[in-house]
Image: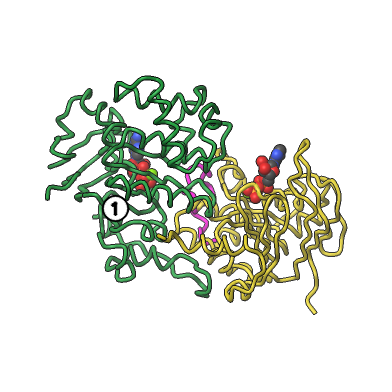
């Protein structure tokens, strides 16, 4: 029996009057890679952000590694367990900070002392090497910035990574490199992934199971194996699958 | 048969403080009433190629070509007034984000009529009829209502269809679509492409479809140019994509994760310096 590390039950997120998540439930096992797909505005980011404490959830429950969390508040344990990588590393990495500062910050907050060794190891792991340590993030390419964002997320040795469209802003060839890097890190560290993407090809490559979201609700959850065999029940899932195959002249 | 558009050895460069950036370095192709795709990664010179044909190259850039000819008109020696009159009337361009092309403070219907009036002497009443017909042609079901809306009051997919309506209302012979659906959800993307496809076929236009998405372009176009570092490294019929010869084209195709292919790790692109020579 695999252990459940992340559980969301009947989660509701409301912005002003707008119900962005309408009773969403999700259960992710230790070591699993779970995908979230759906059109823009369907609530994928809202779900990840509510788990990470960046959005408040009105009702429902959130359990991470057996511990219940509510509202915005997340303790240190939480951030040692869960880290998040966003689509746009421009937004998440301060452009006028050096890579060194960016990587040092989480270590300092959590009271690590062997910072040099950890930073060197983190840079090495994401394939950048120590030559990048004193560059500014605005001097990096999009792919390099995303590598730094991943290094920053991994440096605290979390167990769960929440990945919000981590390659959507990148060229296809750079996407392949970043996906390979993420898979390797998952294998080596036994990580659990929850990954959002609008690209069904990416999600089916990276994940074991996926949930299809629409208008703040989960339409269905299927294994990637079932998706490949077209063994799903919802027409909307079929529409996404057909659309992912490119244009067809009728 | 003389082609609609002939591009021979097109070059676009930008002087900058740190030296000259050569954005387009000798691009050549011809286009008839067909769908031509231009693909390549960001920075490969796709947009600057399209803008040069439109006459929208920034003023400080240097542009040269052995030939840049649209239907017998030498575009590089044509006067600014001549190029303005071509733009919108005979050659039109659709951009990725309608926000940059639609005027935010003018109702949609009026914008379409103004575009029409720039190029043709039509009465308001006739303009309105043609604008409504054009909105219907891009499958806006309640054109009368949308006519009076402002751009921020419509969704992304509808905004892009309105863009198409505005660009096609004068009946251009050549349409350049630069990442026209990249900002849209996949399902909406295909709806918009189907509309574009039908209009291009019905009206007998030449289309240049610019995109970073090799799969999408090849499923939509008859022929594909693959650009790398300002040059065309390969040109091939879409149907023969699988038989691509250039390692860059092959690499672009192979690095895409697809449903059911299970390649772990994904093949990555090994860039060779000689590709950029
Ligand atoms: N902070 C916020 N305030 C108000 N509305 C928001 C906020 N964040 C998200 N929303 C709305 O919630 C819906 C879901 O958004 P999001 O989760 O970002 O969608 P997705 O990631 O699936 O594209 C959208 O309609 C969005 O506009
Ligand atoms: N105004 C400009 N000044 C300097 N360089 C520019 C300018 N516009 C574009 N470039 C450069 O020209 C190259 C090609 O750009 P572009 O045609 O927009 O690429 P693509 O559309 O393929 O992504 C890029 O390297 C870009 O940095
Ligand atoms: Mg999102
Ligand atoms: Mg471009």
According to the colouring, which chain is green? Answer: B
* Quarter assignment of residue A62: bottom right
Residue A171 seen in this snapshot: yes
Q: Which residue is mark 1?
A: B36
* Quarter assignment of residue A33: bottom right
Q: Quadrant of the N terminus of chain A?
A: bottom right
Residue A132 included in the magenta stretch of the image:
yes
Left or right: A231 in relation to A68: left
Q: Is residue B28 above or below residue B53?
A: below
Q: How many marks?
A: 1
Left or right: A48 in relation to B269: right
Left or right: B140 in relation to A230: left
Q: Position of residue A113 (x, y in %)?
A: 72, 55
Residue A120 included in the magenta stretch of the image:
no
The numbered mark 1 sits on a residue in which chain?
Answer: B
* Residue at left offset 49%, top offset 53%: A143
Please give the range of residues in magenta.
A126-143
Near-viewer residue (B177 or A186)? B177
Near-viewer residue (A193 or B109)? B109
- The quadrant where ligand 2 appears is top left
Q: Position of residue B129 (x, y in %)?
A: 42, 29
Element class at badge 1? strand
* Residue at left offset 77%, top offset 35%: A16
Q: Quadrant of the C terminus of chain A?
A: bottom left
Q: Position of residue B276 (x, y in %)?
A: 27, 55
Left or right: B188 in relation to B114: right
Q: Position of residue B261 (x, y in %)?
A: 50, 74
């Amino acid at each position: 029996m695999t252990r459940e590390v992340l559980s969301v039950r009947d989660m509701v997120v409301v912005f002003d009057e707008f119900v962005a998540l309408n009773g969403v439930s999700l259960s992710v096992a230790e070591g699993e890679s779970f995908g979230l797909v759906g059109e823009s505005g369907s609530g994928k980011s809202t779900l990840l952000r509510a788990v990470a404490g960046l959005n408040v959830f009105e009702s429902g429950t959130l359990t991470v590694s057996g511990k219940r969390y509510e509202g915005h508040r997340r303790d240190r344990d939480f951030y040692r367990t869960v880290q998040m990588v966003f689509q746009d590393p421009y937004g998440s990495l301060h452009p006028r900070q050096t890579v060194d500062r960016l990587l040092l910050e989480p270590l300092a907050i959590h009271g690590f002392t062997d910072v040099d060794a950890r930073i060197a190891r983190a840079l090495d792991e994401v394939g950048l090497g120590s030559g990048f340590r004193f560059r500014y993030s605005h001097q990096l390419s999009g792919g390099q910035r995303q590598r730094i964002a991943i290094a920053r997320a991994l440096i605290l040795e979390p167990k769960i990574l929440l990945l919000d469209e981590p390659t959507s802003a990148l060229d296809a060839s750079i996407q392949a490199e970043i996906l390979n890097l993420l898979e390797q890190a998952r294998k080596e560290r036994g990580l659990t992934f929850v990954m959002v993407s609008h690209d069904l090809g990416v999600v089916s490559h990276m994940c074991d199971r996926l949930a299809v979201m629409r208008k703040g609700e989960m339409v269905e959850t299927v294994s990637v194996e079932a998706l490949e065999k077209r063994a799903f029940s919802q027409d909307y899932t079929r529409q996404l699958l057909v659309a992912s195959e490119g244009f067809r002249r009728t | 048969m003389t082609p609609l558009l002939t591009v021979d050895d097109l070059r676009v460069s930008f002087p900058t403080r740190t030296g000259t950036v050569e954005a387009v370095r000798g691009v050549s192709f011809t286009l008839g009433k067909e769908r031509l795709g231009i693909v390549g990664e960001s920075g490969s010179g796709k947009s600057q190629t399209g803008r040069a044909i439109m006459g929208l190259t920034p003023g400080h850039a240097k542009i040269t070509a052995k030939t840049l000819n649209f239907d017998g008109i030498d575009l590089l020696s044509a006067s600014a007034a001549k190029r303005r009159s071509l733009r919108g009337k005979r050659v039109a361009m659709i951009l990725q984000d309608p926000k940059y092309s639609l005027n935010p403070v003018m109702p949609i219907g009026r914008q379409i009529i103004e575009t029409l009036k720039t190029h043709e002497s039509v009465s308001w009443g006739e303009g309105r009829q043609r604008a409504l017909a054009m909105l219907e042609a891009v499958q806006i079901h309640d054109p009368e209502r949308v006519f009076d809306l402002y751009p921020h009051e419509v969704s992304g997919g509808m905004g892009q269809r309105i863009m198409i309506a505005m660009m096609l209302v004068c009946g251009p012979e050549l349409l350049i679509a630069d990442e026209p659906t990249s900002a849209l959800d996949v399902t909406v993307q295909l709806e918009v492409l189907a509309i574009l496809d039908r209009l291009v076929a019905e009206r007998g236009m030449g289309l240049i479809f610019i995109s970073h998405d090799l799969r999408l372009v090849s499923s939509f176009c008859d022929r594909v140019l693959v650009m790398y570092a300002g040059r065309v490294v390969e040109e091939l019929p879409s149907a023969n994509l699988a038989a691509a010869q250039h390692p860059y084209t092959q690499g672009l195709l192979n690095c895409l994760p697809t449903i059911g292919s299970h390649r772990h790790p994904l093949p990555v692109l090994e860039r060779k310096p000689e590709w950029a020579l």
